[in-house]
Amino acid sequence: MDLKLIIKLVKKSYPFMRPYMLRNIIAIVLNQLSMVLVLLVPLLIKILVDDILMTQNFNQLILFGIAMFGIYLLSNVFAFLSNYIYANFAESFVIDARNLLYDKLLNMKMSFFIKEKVGNIVSRLRDDAAEIHSLLSFILDKILINIVKVIIIFIILFKMNFYLALISIITIPIFIFVNNFFSQKLREQSHITRQYFADLMSFFMNSFSKIILIKNFCYENQEKEKHNVISKKLRHSMIRGEILGYLVMEVTRLVTNFSGVIILTLGGYMVLKGKLTVGELIAYYTYLKLIYDPILDLTRSTALINRTIAGMERYFEYFELDELEEKDKGIEVPFTGDIKLENVSFKYIDEPIYTGVNLQIKPKEKILILGKSGQGKTTLAYLLKGFYQPQRGEILLDGYNIQQINLVSLRKNIGYLPQEAFIIDGTIRENLTCVKEDATEEEMWWALDQAQIGDYIRTQLKNGLDEVLSNNGSSLSGGQRQRISIARLFLQNPKIIIFDEIFTGLDLETEKYIWNNIKKFIKDKTALFISHKIVEPNYFDSFCLVKNNKIIKFSSFAELEQEESYFAYLEDSKVS
């Protein structure tokens, strides 16, 4: 085991441990008392063999039985109280660690989520967060107690027979060598196993998120093959880790058994020579076995501790990343709707999306943004919302660089309605108040009516606003989910709005009704419409065509129609 690394990780874990320190110390003290009482047993056995049985003293035999029973009773009571105290704070401790990591993740920049697999994140939240508790429990409980136990027993052994004690300790260097030799390999293997497990979690999440696609194309067998490949790698890695752990345990067991044979042989010789009593030999051998038990426990713990260390290292990796959003900083701006992109360039990892884009959007301007899939229309929304930052150039709102503006204010004042409707697991009321906590029922019903979903909720859902939705609103149709999202936007009432394919899943009649309500709603707002189809072209003040990493702006539909690239867009997108 790498003690320096363990100490480093324990120091990092101290903030989690601090609230539970007193209870943990009490649990440790009780456990130590339980252990010390058990160590009295070999001494009592020596007295039984050398004194009580030799003198055939029946009264002392009765006292011996009472003493033994009392020792075991107290030891068990102390052990139970220790475990009881420990159980009461252990789970709270894990939850605190998990909550801290979750809070950290919620405040990470979007660039982090582009690079990191969802399964990897879930694995660290679910498994690695619990490893802090596991390591501390081993250090403050089993390892600490076993070390104290070994020290006490060694003192007793040297007091009983100095020469036998010297012979007994020859196994310690061998034990340390074996332990150190395998520890690094075990930790490396644990890292590999955890990564394979995270890959498996990512595969499961991805597979079930596209289950309709899999069934639609009868792709089940191919998915099974992919699963088998990942599972095979995980299985081999886990088996290798188990074998390494068992190898450490058995080699150490062989060393300790060899030492026991030597002690019994030499001790028997000393009994024959009258230098040692039978009771002393029995007590000595019992202590020797007691000292090997904690050593074996330490060895058995090596595999688990190394796996735990690997988990803790993965857990703390996220805390060392400098990718946090600074939501409490920045200036406030009026959000008049004046937007300017100056020489903006942006790419996802190595894929260029925008190169030297310049764009001016005036207050209250209504813009239709057209372009083929994958050209970067939605990316523009993400840049304006502050999800991503351009690698070059500036995005200005009211003349201020977007990175200088308070992030919370920015996101509250720039509304974004994505193409895919997202429903929060909870009531319809919670799905609305998430954008306006103090919204009245009257305001909520107004927003729902504007999105033409109010009547359905009143008449078809028995709990109305308190109807519980789960699994991204799976009990609703796609169009109904979209209308709740639109209602949420009405209630938010932002100053700048970005609509991304808002009519997905809506029939023509509903689309027309909502479109008229939206036009009234955004009359005095700046609005950007991302769409594949042109609805009421005469309504828009200007048009943008996203193509070849550029955004080309046209002041009218007539000007757009004269552009060659527009006809290419119509042909490619099959839009009329």
Image (cartoon, rainbow, N blue to C red):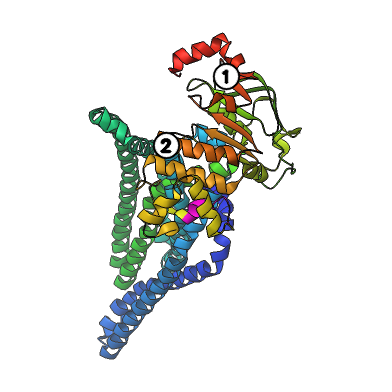
Q: Position of residue 3 (x, y in %)?
A: 52, 48
Residue receiving disc 1? 545
User: What kind of element bears circle 2?
Assistant: helix
User: Which of 147 and 524 lies nearest the eye of the viewer?
Assistant: 524
Residue receiving disc 2? 509
Q: Position of residue 6 (x, y in %)?
A: 52, 49
Amino acid carrying mark 1 in the image: Leu
Q: CA distance from mark 2 to mark 1?
A: 28 Å
Q: Position of residue 312 (x, y in %)?
A: 49, 47
In the image, residue 447 lies in the stretch drawn in magenta? no
Which residue is painted at 46% across and 34% down in the image? Answer: 503
As drawn, is 16 to the left or to the right of 86? right
Q: Position of residue 63 (x, y in %)?
A: 32, 87
User: Which of 31 and 435 lies nearest the eye of the viewer?
Assistant: 435
Q: Quadrant of residue 555 in the image?
A: top right
User: What kind of element bears circle 1?
Assistant: strand
In the image, residue 430 lies in the stretch drawn in magenta? yes
Amino acid carrying mark 2 in the image: Glu
Query: Which mark lies nearer to you, 2 or 1?
Result: 2
User: Which of 250 and 233 lies nearest the eye of the viewer?
Assistant: 233
Please say if the residues under marks 2 and 1 sit with CB atoms less than 8 Å apart: no
Would residue 456 be seen by someone viewing this image from the given angle? yes
Q: The magenta stretch spans which residues? A: 429-437
Q: Is residue 366 above or below residue 409?
A: above
